[in-house]
Amino acid sequence: MPEAVKFDMQGNEIDKVILPESVFNSEINEPIVHKVVSAQLSAKRAGTASTKTRNEVRGGGSKPWRQKGTGRARHGTIRSPLWVGGGITFGPKPRNYQKKVNKKEKSLALKSILTDKANRDSILVFDEIDFPEIKTSQCVDFLKDIELYDKKVLIILEDENANVYYSARNIPEVNTLVIEALNAYDLLDNDYILVTEDGIRKLEEVLSE
């Protein structure tokens, strides 16, 4: 059964935690992970790039010179894509880049990534993750105590916690997410996952729905 080390806020190892097999011992499905992450990144694209075709460029209503007798190539408009300042052939137009991914695929991707993180001992469980006040230095000291200050860290919170969120947001390599907002890209993009025991139980509930 998958296990993780349990720490207190001072970085002291206090126990070992059995991770639920339904979440942390799943089959790792790389194609599904790729599909979900690609869809997530595609959804972030604005899709507002636009160029004008020859019909949309202003001007060019008259033929630039007569058809024959000039010795030059024949042209019907200066807004042809062959001309500088003319229309663009096959240029980008506003479009929607979103890709459809169903709920089961998202859940399977999350389970695959969490299983991989568990196999790499990259999941650290804590009895609690909280600070008495909003202060960046408290989060810095916490990360130094657990020797992860220079690592990319994702703190998963079971509920919104302003003290943790605002204390961590100015640290470049640290991200915080509530379980409901957990996504494949952020799981992959961070080296270590910090979560509480209560968070593990809630994560199991959410991913088993």
Image (tube, rainbow, N blue to C red):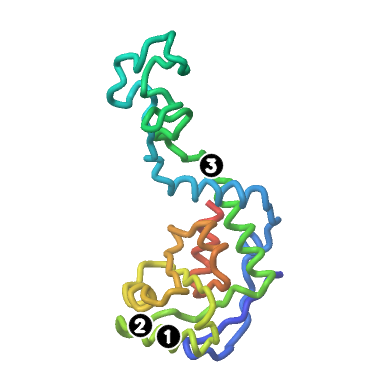
Q: CA distance from mark 2 to mark 1?
A: 6 Å
| Label located before the other in sequence (1 or 3) | 3
Q: Which mark is residue 140?
A: 1
Secondary structure state at the residue bearing disc 1: helix
Which residue extends farthest top? 68
Give the quadrant of the N terminus. bottom right
Compared with 85, 151 (above or below) is below
Q: Of callouts 2 and 3, which one flags the residue occurring earlier in the amino acid sequence?
A: 3
89 over 35 or under it: above or below: above
* Picture coordinates of residue 102, whole percent (x, y): 53, 42
Q: Quadrant of residue 2?
A: bottom right
Neighbor class of circle 3 (other Cα within 10 Å; few <14, some 14-19, many 20+) is: few
Residue 51: percent from left, percent from top: 38, 34
Mark 2 touching mark 3, by CB under 8 A? no
Label 1 environment density (alpha carbons within 10 Å; few <14, some 14–19, many ≥20): some
Query: For the residue carrying disc 2, how many other residues have a C-alpha within 10 Å: few (<14), some (14-19), or many (20+)?
Result: some
In this rendered view, identify the residue nearer to me: 206 or 167: 167
The mark lying in front, picked from 1 and 3, is 1
Q: Is residue 153 above or below residue 209?
A: below
Under mark 2, the amino acid is: Thr
Identity, as a three-letter code, of the amino acid under mark 1: Val
Circles 1 and 3: CB atoms closer than 8 Å: no
**In 3D space, how far apart are the residues under numbered discs 2 and 3 (Cα atoms)?**
38 Å
Q: Nearer the viewer, residue 8 or 106?
A: 106
Q: Residue at x 37, y 24 (%)?
A: 79
Q: Do the numbered discs 2 and 1 sit on residues whose CB atoms are within 8 Å?
A: yes
> Which residue in the structure is indicated by mark 3?
102
Mark 2 sits on what residue?
A: 136
Q: Position of residue 204 (x, y in %)?
A: 55, 61
**Real-space Cα distance between discs 1 and 3?**
38 Å
Q: Amino acid at mark 3?
A: Asn
Q: Secondary structure at mark 3?
A: loop
